[in-house]
């Protein structure tokens, strides 16, 4: 039976690259998306063109009922999830003094609340199987902080603490939990910053350029592989040598 | 479901889902002290009870389960109530 991976926020950007990478590694991939069904279908088609198996599944991952329904659908259609990639994330930047409670709640619930809900849902079958991989996409913003991103940085730092705690809770059952903290990666999220900002950022990166989504996806692929069986509770920084 | 039936089903779950030694399972056996079930194992037991008997066990009630017999008592009460 093919192992099943569920990637949240997989219709574009880093999530899309992760879905494609895991499919190429032989996983049947559940491609979760919030609203852009055309983009999610495109990811599924691309996987199927290459002989892989995939399923697009709509769910607002900050909503407990939607998450439960998503896991039920994936379990029925593809099988139990053995690799969960908590990737879904949004930004809604603003200096703290101008930040509304809505901006705070939306970003924290989508970026961190979703990790709680999806991990909890995935662990049931992983505990039974006594194996599983949970890979959480954090951010360098959560490690170093970033002005205008107190909500996003708090959520992304929260993911790191969550990762370490759950790794200790479920390690005895052969389940690993790790995080990846990407730096500046070429996605819609960083494109929104504008060329001036990204050019200035590139100068602060040892490798002199922004990263590609595939350069994060390959680390997810590694953490999901047999080769990473003795790594847990870690945060792997993938930032090209960024000095913040 | 008769009590004896619940008891034998529970014993089966303890062996299959928690990997316990069938010889050590008695009504008086304490999960943590005698059967060496860790805290996550207790959670797994609750999940198994919920899935297999179709009952919901809130955390407050779960705390009353110390021994195998008490787990049977709780399921019996849940199914009756």
Image (cartoon, coloured by chain):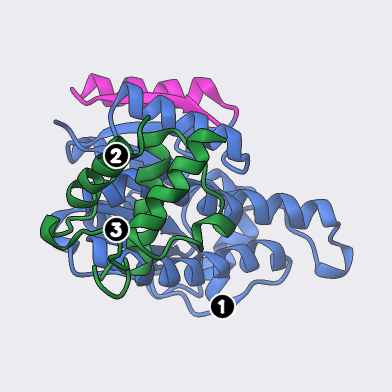
Chain colours: A blue, B green
- From the viewer's side, name the closer residue of A79 and A138: A79
- From the viewer's side, name the closer residue of A173 and A139: A173
- From the viewer's side, name the closer residue of B19 and A87: B19
Residue bearing the label numbered 3: B27
Please determine whether, in this image, residue B26 is positioned above or below residue B79.
below
The residue drawn where x is 62% and y is 43% is A62
Q: Which mark is residue B4?
A: 2
Residue bearing the label numbered 1: A144
- Chain containing mark 2: B
Q: Position of residue A194 (x, y in %)?
A: 64, 52
- Are the residues under badges 3 and 2 in a single subunit? yes
Question: Mark 2 Cα within 10 Å, few/some/many (few <14, many 20+)?
Answer: few
Q: Secondary structure at mark 1?
A: helix
Earlier in the chain: of badge 3 and badge 2, it is 2
- From the viewer's side, name the closer residue of A1 and A85: A1
Which stretch is magenta?
Answer: A35-59
The residue drawn where x is 16% and y is 63% is B24
Q: CA distance from mark 1 to mark 3?
A: 54 Å
Please determine whether, in this image, residue B26 is positioned above or below residue A25.
below
- Chain containing mark 1: A
Residue B11 magenta-drawn? Answer: no
Q: Position of residue A7 (x, y in %)?
A: 40, 41
Q: Position of residue A109 (x, y in %)?
A: 66, 51
Q: Position of residue B73 (x, y in %)?
A: 43, 49
Question: Mark 1 Cα within 10 Å, few/some/many (few <14, many 20+)?
Answer: few
């Amino acid at each position: 039976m093919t192992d099943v991976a569920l990637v949240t926020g997989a219709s574009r950007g880093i999530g899309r690259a992760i879905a494609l990478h895991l499919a190429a590694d032989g996983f049947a991939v559940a491609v979760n998306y919030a609203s852009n069904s055309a983009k999610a279908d495109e990811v599924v088609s691309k996987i199927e063109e290459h002989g892989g198996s995939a399923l697009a599944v709509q769910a607002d991952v900050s909503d407990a009922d939607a998450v439960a329904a998503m896991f039920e659908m994936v379990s029925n259609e593809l099988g139990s999830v053995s690799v969960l990639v908590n990737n879904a994330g949004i930004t809604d930047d603003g200096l703290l003094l101008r930040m509304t409670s809505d901006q705070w709640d939306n970003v924290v619930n989508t970026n961190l609340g979703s990790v709680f809900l999806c991990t909890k849902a995935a662990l049931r079958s992983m505990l039974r199987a006594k194996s599983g991989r949970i890979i959480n996409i954090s951010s360098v913003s959560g490690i170093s902080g970033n002005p205008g991103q107190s909500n996003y940085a708090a959520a992304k730092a929260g993911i790191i603490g969550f990762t370490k705690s759950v790794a200790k809770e479920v390690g005895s059952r052969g389940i690993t939990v790790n995080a990846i903290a990407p730096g500046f990666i070429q996605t819609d999220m960083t494109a929104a910053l504008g060329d001036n900002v990204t050019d200035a950022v590139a100068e602060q990166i040892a490798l002199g350029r922004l990263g590609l989504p595939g350069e994060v996806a390959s680390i997810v692929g590694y953490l999901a592989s047999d080769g990473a069986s003795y790594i847990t509770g870690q945060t792997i920084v993938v930032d090209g040598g960024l000095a913040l | 479901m008769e009590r004896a039936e619940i008891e034998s089903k529970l014993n089966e779950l303890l062996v299959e889902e928690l990997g316990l030694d069938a010889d050590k399972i008695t009504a008086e056996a304490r999960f943590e002290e005698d059967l060496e079930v860790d805290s996550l194992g207790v959670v797994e037991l609750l999940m198994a009870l919920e899935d297999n008997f179709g009952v919901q066990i809130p955390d407050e009630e779960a705390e009353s389960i110390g021994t195998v017999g008490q787990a049977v008592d709780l399921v019996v009460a849940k199914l009756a109530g």
